Amino acid sequence: MQIEGKRYLAGLTALPEVGWYDLSLLDLSVMLPQTDFIRIGLAIIAGALVLLGILAFSLHTMVLKPVAMLTDAVTRIRRGDYSAKPQEKSSGEVRELLSQFSHMAENIYNTQQWLEAEIEKRTHQLNDAQKVLEISLQHERNGRETQANLMALMAHEMRSPIAVIGNTAQMLEMLVQNERPEWLPRVEKIMRSVRQLSLLMDNFLTEKWLDMDKRGLNRETGDLNQLCSIVTESFIENQVRHVHFEPLKGDASICADWQLLRIAVINLLDNAGKYSSPTDEIRLKVLSCQPDWLCIEVSDEGVGMPPELQAHVFEKFARGRHENSIRGSGLGLYLVNWIARFHGGHMDVTSVEGEGSTFCLCLPLCEPEQDEVKAIQST
């Protein structure tokens, strides 16, 4: 209660049975001075601040500082520096984390050292393999050069005997027509063999074939109708076969290597003659298959080919099912395809077994020199 502006704490004691009452007043300013409360508050605040300081120091020492060191170590390891490792002065989970990180960093360092050693080892092996490959390629070049010289020498030495045999066979044919007609089949067989040898020499023994990839095509502009007509007449005369030639109605000019195209057309006609009977007709057409392209199409009515053989017919040494009864080396169509691709063109074939085959040599009107190189390198 408050009396005359002062605060008192009142205490009442009473015994109603005997009528005794006692009232005590205590001065609060004396019993509980306010300065004591201020001191207690200040003591509590100071204690709280001390506790917070201790907690902050412990948190910094045991958690924040190790985490900062761990972050710094991770950054250095990311840059490739494995020398810095975090100090393991913490305890509990943080200490375990730092320990695991140190083991991980050591394993990464060991793995990197192993990888660098393996890379260096493989690099030495690759360098050694490259040197061996270069030596092998050089040996192969030397072998090819020796083979080219030998083949050129054979071509030079074989031309004269073949010409002598051919001329002698022609004179013998004229002599036996009247005096010994029964010898004509043998003489004709000799002349066919001479023509076959000449064709083989054109295909394999000409020096131009051996160095074609170095010198490129000898391109000239000419008439494809005229070439096919000349080759057809020669084939009819030599093989005694009927060939129906259908020229292109229009301009058949093309820029090409005409010696190679002559060999290609001869091989296509020779292939059609081999795989068809003497009474079957061979058809040769010059046509425009697409803009800026001309095609030479040769068809026969012979034995044809199954689908599985058509996929490999232009490969080297590929022969049909009748290879034992039909002469040939398996290189004619391979060379035709080689000539087509060397000109930047391609070969197509359609065939039905028992009904005949059609081969189509497609050529661009003119091909840039760099494409010629790409064509021969891809064969």
Image (spheres, helix red, strand yellow):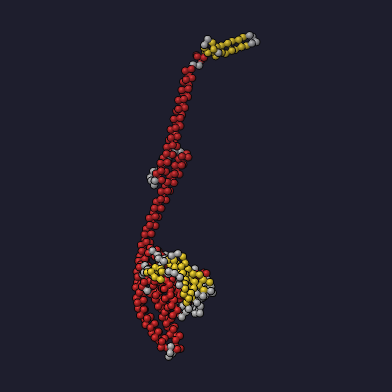
In this view, 114 is above or below 263: above
For the C terminus, the quadrant is bottom left
Is residue 217 or residue 296 the one in the foreground?
A: 296
- Residue drawn at the location 45% of the way across and 89% of the way down: 181
Q: Position of residue 278 (x, y in %)?
A: 49, 79
**Residue 249 can be seen, yes or no:** yes
Taking depth in this image into account, of 91 and 281 the one nearest to the observer is 281
Give how far across and how far down residue 251 sits, in percent. Answer: 43, 69
Residue 330 seen from this side: no
Depth check, front residue: 240 or 132: 240
Residue at position x 39%, y 53% in the image = 116
Instruction: Please state the total of marks drawn on the protein image.
Output: 0
Determine which quarter of the picture holds residue 165: bottom left
* In the foreground, 87 or 341: 341
Q: Residue at x 47, y 67 (%)?
A: 289
Q: Where residue 152 sits: x, y (%)?
A: 35, 74
Residue 68: give x, y in percent of width and height: 42, 39
Residue most toward the top? 19
Return the residue found at the far bottom. Answer: 179
Q: Quadrant of residue 215?
A: bottom left
